[in-house]
Amino acid sequence: MSEVATRSFMTEKQTRATVTVVVVVWNAKAYVVECLSSMREQCAGAYAEVIVVDNASTDGTPELIATMFPEFKLIRNAENLGFAKANNIGIEQSTGDYICLVNSDVKFINDSISMLSTYLHQNPTVAMVGPKMLAANGEIRRSTMRFPTVWNYFCRALGLDFLFKGSRLFGGLLMSDFDHRSTRHVEVLNGWFVMARRSALERVGLLDGRFFMYGEDIDWCYRFSQAGLQIVFCADAEAIHYGGASSANAPLRFHLELFRADWQLWRKHHGWLAQAVFLAVQSIHHAIRIFGAAGNYLLNPSNRPKTRLKLQKSIAALKLLREMSAKEQTTYLDDAVSTN
């Protein structure tokens, strides 16, 4: 088990609250105000404390939170530490038996916090639970995954998960065969809104702070699974997730952060051969996207602004892949020399 998974970070407290909510925010003032306001309105009494961790926002977010929500604990980081480290800071300050991590661009439409804590109370073998994700228009969105595999990535690269949405064989990674309308055990809960038992966190450890943004949720769920702990998607609880509250400020940068996180996750849990296959499959993935976006750019002038961004994302990812491949080849050669 990794160093992150075995590290002790909790101290016993004589009095523990039922639920601690941790919200991390970075330059998303309008979203976090709606998040905290709707939480206060819909979930009053469901939580004993709310900890807001601000990642050095420059848009006046922390000042506004301090004024509008004086009952919530506000932690101001001197720099943007990333999503995982900021959540860890909140977790380390928490006192609840259940720790609820909520993205700043979530809107509560009912008391989903009580629903999730009740589910954990009634199902003592479950360690982590997450609600149904809704778009602003009420449409159900995907919020679960299966653990990444070479086959899953290959299906994504060729678009097989899109062509065969109901297929368990081809739609594995993003669970296109699951409509998110029923409660079930899952491998991965995406980290927009999850609740976990403190006792489980004491076994598994904090989020891996080496992930700056993205990937930490998959890694965390993998470590829960490795520890034999159950993870459940609860269809009865639901909330709106706007998505991209922080990443909208720099879409290209955060696209590359997502890609780096996928690579970082893959390297952490797989050997060199699987890593080489990953780089090859991802190269195919982005090459196909570039050709598709280029064709769409020429044939659909009205979509060019959106298509241009897609092109930029895939081209940047392909360049990064070449750098990664060159670096890995150098590493393998150095390792080979050092062992001879």
Image (tube, helix red, strand yellow):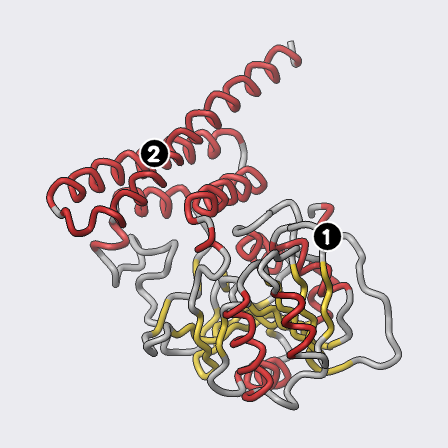
Foreground label between 1 and 2: 1
- Whether residue 205 is visible here, answered yes or no, is no
- Whether residue 230 is visible here, answered yes or no, is yes
How far from the left and from the top, in percent, is residue 94? 75, 70
Q: What residue type is labelled 2?
A: Ile
Using the rendered view, name the quadrant where residue 100 is placed.
bottom right
85 relative to 166, above or below: above
Q: Which residue is drawn at 50% across and 70% down?
A: 31
**CA neighbours of label 2 inside 10 A, class few (<14), some (14 to 19), many (20+):** some
**Label number found at residue 315:** 2
Q: Looking at the image, do the residues carrying marks 1 and 2 touch, with CB atoms under 8 Å apart?
A: no
Using the rendered view, name the quadrant where residue 90 is placed.
bottom right
Of labels 1 and 2, earlier in sequence is 1
The answer to whether 190 appears left or right of 200 in the picture is left
Q: Name the residue that disc number 1 marks.
A: 78
**Label number found at residue 109:** none
Q: What element carries label 1?
A: loop
In this orientation, which residue lies closer to the viewer: 31 or 68? 68
Q: Residue at x 45, y 79 (%)?
A: 238
In this orientation, which residue lies closer to the viewer: 146 or 9? 9
38 relative to 197, above or below: below
